[in-house]
Image: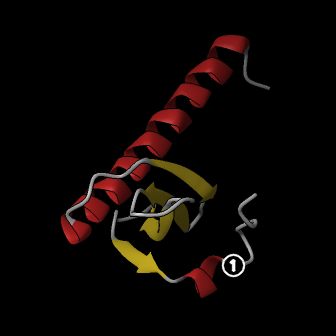
Amino acid sequence: MPGLFERMRLRRLARQREAAIVERALLEFRTSRGVNPLGSHVLRPGPPEVIVRVTYFTNHIPPDRAWYAVSETDGTVRELSFDDVAHLESPWR
């Protein structure tokens, strides 16, 4: 069993990896939509893909959402439809 410092190091590496994946999804969102996102959230960690939800403002509330699958192996990003992630989402309250 790893010691305390090893667990802390592994947790820090996992957070850094997740942050890099989220940044990759945000970059794809900005590039394809030309809009600044409001925020993002990991809906499902990998492997093999991490599903990231990106929220953004339009002219109504609640904000709109876009979903991306980011590969953990090569960093490729593909946009998903709501039907692809409906089982991961909860309704707006």
> Which quadrant would residue 72 be assigned to in this image?
bottom left
Q: How is the image coloured?
A: secondary structure
- Residue 66 x/y as whole percent: 46, 69
Q: Is residue 80 above or below residue 14?
A: below
Q: Is residue 6 above or below residue 70?
A: above
Question: In the image, what residue occupies the spot 34% across and 63% down?
Answer: 75
All told, the count of numbered labels is: 1
Say if residue 45 shows up in the picture.
no
Question: For mark 1, what is the residue?
Answer: 86
Question: In the image, what residue occupies the spot 71% across and 13% down?
Answer: 4
Relative to 74, is 65 on the left or the right?
Answer: right
Q: Quadrant of the N terminus?
A: top right
Residue closer to the observer: 1 or 41: 41
Q: Is residue 83 above or below residue 67?
A: below
Question: In the image, what residue occupies the spot 40% across and 63% down?
Answer: 59
- Residue 61 x/y as whole percent: 54, 59
Say if residue 39 shows up in the picture.
yes
Q: Residue furthest bottom?
A: 83
Q: Is residue 64 above or below residue 79?
A: above
Residue closer to the observer: 46 or 33: 33
- Residue 21 x/y as whole percent: 41, 51
Element type at mark 1: loop
Q: Residue furthest front?
A: 59
Question: In the image, what residue occupies the spot 33% across and 70% down?
Answer: 76
Q: Residues within 10 Å of mark 1 (few under 14, many from 20)?
A: few
Residue closer to the observer: 10 or 84: 84
Relative to 91, is 53 on the left or the right?
Answer: left
Looking at numbered disc 1 in the image, what kind of residue is underneath it?
Ala
> Which quadrant would residue 16 be assigned to in this image?
top left
Q: Quadrant of the C terminus?
A: bottom right
- Residue 24 x/y as whole percent: 33, 55
